[in-house]
């Protein structure tokens, strides 16, 4: 771990990513302390107020939205939803997919055929379209969003985990472990998992970015989290009718979204280089 | 090089000429082309180009001849004779005759008798009230009513004349896709959620329609409608929020046209549900609304608060709207047995159908919460098509956004709140109102009718089946290239609209 930190410090870009992401995670955790207003409190007389630093009234640093809710408070609370959905879907989808992938790679045969055909079917659907369709049936709710996006996430994990497991199982130490009578679960736990986890972490970082964007897309389209809950995607969607007279309503949550996704991607890139043995000096 | 530019220029000439078709940008699509199913103003606007009725509601909201040239009441007041226009043909070549008119009216009455909603007028005149429809000769129609019906010509302005050869035995799908009327335009093309294109009817009996082709497009987002208006691909857009209208006033080549409309915007209350059965609770909801704040924030102070619910000339001149009085609202709730308020399921609204509907609904929800009335599922939004079928099926939560277009006629506006009306979405039934309604239908004396109308409005305000909000000022964005001005009933007619710059 200390080793990881030392290498990380060498990449300025990755450090910037860590910093930005760290700040946003802190902001999300401390949302109730940081938000100057209740994010759902409506003040219709004060709608579409300009950001204070852009000639608007005092009190609303980032201005207000189309019904007069404080934008800063909503962005701060929106960070919670975005990060929570991102992390939860990667955990659920990632663990599920990786588990199936390792099973497929380890046992081969019919188990592998069934699992990998399921992956093919899943990958044949455009994931956001599938998500919109399922959300339209289930109705808007945070848990439904997590379920739907996890469903769109598991397949790539499964593929990579299987491939890695296949190659690991060719190694002599696996044969050796079998020869001394180690059971399959013990082999998976001790030898397979540690060897496949690197690439999976890289995929997880990209899936995190994708899912944050996907959650925003669903909320933008109005089929994500219920509309009164502050989410970045929902704010983008609500603000688009006002883009010509009140650019801040959809621009600022868009900037927040961009910062998070960019940081996660930078970190993911760096992780990939770090974990790729051919690039290590 | 020069030839390339020329070629490009010609491509544009060919391509651009399509774009100069006179185009209206609507926020929602029509649900159907079935003449029985056209209720919304967008649908009626389109329907009026395809179909015609015996009488016609003019721009000044007066009844004028259309397919009937004149009419008279026979002695006894219950039988009318309508003299029909000769030489009129339907789009499929069938001649229009008294038989065709009788066929169409019977169809409407039959649908109404089956309990189906078939448009404003038929709702107001139950089928049982018309006892006989008969063709005396090929261009003379007799209509007999059970009791004297002074407003029969008004009702007839809302029933389209249908080609019997096409519509006899036609199933729902045929009617929904293939309109055949006598109107100035015929259907060329309909792509759901995209556009409807109409082409001039070459055999039209009246003045030749001004435009060869007209297009009704669906552009759900106001920002896109505005952008298309400004670049000239759309020539009329409606439902402009006032702040966007201000933007438009500064743009070149377009102008803002507005008329005091008749659309009454309110929150419908399901009056048969839990605490909402108590009228004190419904009054409390009304006292909880700070309309001045809404008006200032959303409408630039231009909206007219609703107290009296009917439109001119029948509007009650001095009914004060509910005051904003949270203390009184809480007191009324306590009196009704809810000192701490209560929870309702939700407030539903379509998204983008009515002006700033979602913003309005969210604000109302937060103001209700101030007096302790909370929503378990908050404000729920629906695409208009889904919301429309929820309304028609009376599948509604405790509170729901509603906006009722103006008819400027007491009978049709009053009918909406009778318990037998399919458009009474509120489950509201009041004996005094029903008694007034029965009397109204038989009353021919204009002064007494007006009095009944005033009493009805007093009852409605007191009983509060709605959270009364405001009466809309209809605001349109219009291209400077056309000579069109809005009607007060939100119906858009294009057959006499010309280009002002001489284009064709």
Image (cartoon, coloured by chain):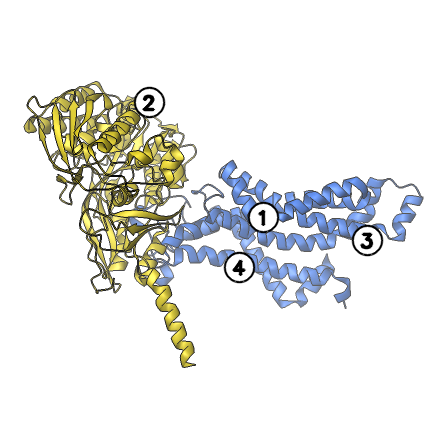
Task: Identify the subunit bearing mark 4.
Answer: A
Q: Residues within 10 Å of mark 3 (few under 14, many from 20)?
A: some
- Residue linked to disc 2: B272
- Residue linked to disc 1: A127
Q: Earlier in the sequence, mark 3 or mark 1?
A: 1
- Residue linked to disc 3: A167
Q: Earlier in the sequence, mark 4 or mark 3?
A: 3
Q: Secondary structure at mark 4?
A: helix
Q: Colour of chain A?
A: blue
Q: Nearer the viewer, mark 4 or mark 1?
A: 1
Q: Nearer the viewer, mark 3 or mark 1?
A: 1
Q: Position of residue A240 (x, y in %)?
A: 40, 54
Residue drawn where x is 69% and y is 60% of the image: A272
Task: Identify the subunit bearing mark 3.
Answer: A
In space, the residues marked 2 and 4 are separated at their CA atoms by 50 Å
In space, the residues marked 2 and 3 are separated at their CA atoms by 68 Å
- Residue linked to disc 4: A259
Q: Position of residue A54 (x, y in %)?
A: 36, 62
Q: Is residue B356 left or right of residue B443?
A: right
Task: Identify the subunit bearing mark 2.
Answer: B
Q: Nearer the viewer, mark 4 or mark 3?
A: 3
**Measured along the vertical axis of the image, is residue B493 above or below residue B112?**
below
Asked if the residue at tag 1 contacts the one at tag 2, i.e. Cβ–Cβ closer than 8 Å, the answer is no
Q: Secondary structure at mark 1?
A: helix
Marks 2, 1 in one chain: no
Task: Say which chain is yellow.
Answer: B
Q: Is residue B300 visible?
A: no
Q: Nearer the viewer, mark 2 or mark 4?
A: 2
């Amino acid at each position: 771990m200390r080793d990881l930190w030392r290498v990380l410090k060498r990449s300025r870009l990755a450090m910037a990513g860590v910093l930005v992401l760290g700040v946003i995670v802190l902001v999300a955790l401390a949302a109730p302390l940081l938000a100057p207003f209740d994010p759902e409190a409506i003040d219709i007389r004060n709608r579409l107020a300009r950001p204070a630093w852009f000639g608007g009234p005092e009190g609303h640093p980032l201005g207000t939205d189309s019904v007069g809710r404080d934008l800063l408070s909503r962005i701060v609370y929106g960070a919670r939803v975005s990060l929570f959905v991102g992390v939860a879907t990667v955990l659920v989808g990632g663990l599920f997919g990786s588990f199936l992938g390792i099973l497929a790679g380890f046992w081969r045969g019919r188990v592998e055929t069934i699992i990998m055909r399921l992956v093919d079917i899943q990958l044949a659907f455009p994931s956001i379209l599938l998500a919109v369709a399922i959300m339209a049936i289930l109705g808007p709710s945070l848990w439904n969003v997590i379920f739907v996006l996890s469903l769109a996430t598991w397949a790539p994990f499964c593929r990579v985990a299987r491939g890695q497991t296949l190659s690991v199982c060719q190694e002599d130490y696996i044969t050796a472990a079998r020869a001394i009578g180690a059971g399959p679960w013990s082999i998976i736990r001790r030898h397979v998992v540690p060897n496949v986890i690197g690439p999976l972490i890289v995929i997880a970082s990209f899936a995190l970015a994708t899912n944050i964007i996907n959650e925003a897309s669903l909320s933008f389209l109005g089929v994500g989290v219920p509309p009164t809950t502050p989410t970045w995607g929902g704010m983008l969607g609500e603000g688009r009718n006002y883009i010509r007279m009140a650019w801040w309503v959809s621009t600022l949550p868009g900037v927040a979204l961009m910062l998070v996704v960019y940081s996660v991607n930078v970190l993911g890139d760096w992780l990939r280089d770090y974990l790729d043995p051919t690039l290590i000096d | 090089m020069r030839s390339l530019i020329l070629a490009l220029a010609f491509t544009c000439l060919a391509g651009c000429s399509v774009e100069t078709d006179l185009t209206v940008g609507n926020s929602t699509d029509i649900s159907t082309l079935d003449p029985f199913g056209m209720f919304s103003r967008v649908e009626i606007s389109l329907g009026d180009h395809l179909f015609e009725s015996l009488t016609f509601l003019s721009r000044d909201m007066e009844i004028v001849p259309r397919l009937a040239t004149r009419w008279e009441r026979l002695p006894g007041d219950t039988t009318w004779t309508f003299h029909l226009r000769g030489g009129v043909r339907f789009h499929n070549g069938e001649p229009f005759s008294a038989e065709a008119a009788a066929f169409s009216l019977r169809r409407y009455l039959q649908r109404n008798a089956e309990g189906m909603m078939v448009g404003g007028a038929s709702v107001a005149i139950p089928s049982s009230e018309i006892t006989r429809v008969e063709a005396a000769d090929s261009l003379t129609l007799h209509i007999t009513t059970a009791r004297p019906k002074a407003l029969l010509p008004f009702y007839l302005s809302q029933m389209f004349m249908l080609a019997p050869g096409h519509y006899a035995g036609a199933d729902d799908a045929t009617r929904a896709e293939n309109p055949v009327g006598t109107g100035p335009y015929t259907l060329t093309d309909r792509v759901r959620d995209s556009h409807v294109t109409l082409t001039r009817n070459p055999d039209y009996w009246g003045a030749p329609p001004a435009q060869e082709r007209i297009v009704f497009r669906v552009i759900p987002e106001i920002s896109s409608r505005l952008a298309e208006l400004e670049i000239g691909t759309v020539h009329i857009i409606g439902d402009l929020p006032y702040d966007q209208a201000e933007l438009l006033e500064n743009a070149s080549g377009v102008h803002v046209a507005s008329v005091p409309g008749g659309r009454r915007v309110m929150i419908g209350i399901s009056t048969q549900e839990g605490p909402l059965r108590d009228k004190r609770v419904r009054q409390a909801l009304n006292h909880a609304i700070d309309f001045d704040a809404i008006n200032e924030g959303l409408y630039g102070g231009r909206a007219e608060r609703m107290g009296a619910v009917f439109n001119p000339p029948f509007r009650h001149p001095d009914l004060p709207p509910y005051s904003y009085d949270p203390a009184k609202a809480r007191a009324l709730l306590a009196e009704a047995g809810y000192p701490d308020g209560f929870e309702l399921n939700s407030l539903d609204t379509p998204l983008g159908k009515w002006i700033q509907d979602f913003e309005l609904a969210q604000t109302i929800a937060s103001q209700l919460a101030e007096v302790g009335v909370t929503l378990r599922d908050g404000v729920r939004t629906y695409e208009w098509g889904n919301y429309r079928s929820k309304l028609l099926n009376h599948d509604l939560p405790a509170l729901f956004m509603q906006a009722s277009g103006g008819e400027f006629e007491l009978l049709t506006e009053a009918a909406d709140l009778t318990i037998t009306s399919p458009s009474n979405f509120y489950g509201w039934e009041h004996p005094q109102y029903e008694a007034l309604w029965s009397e109204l239908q038989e009353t021919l004396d204009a002064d007494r009718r007006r009095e009944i109308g005033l009493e009805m409005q007093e009852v409605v305000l007191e009983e509060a089946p709605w959270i009364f909000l405001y009466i809309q000022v209809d605001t349109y964005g219009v291209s400077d290239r056309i000579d069109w001005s809005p009607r007060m009933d939100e119906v858009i007619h294009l057959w006499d609209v010309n280009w002002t710059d001489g284009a064709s």
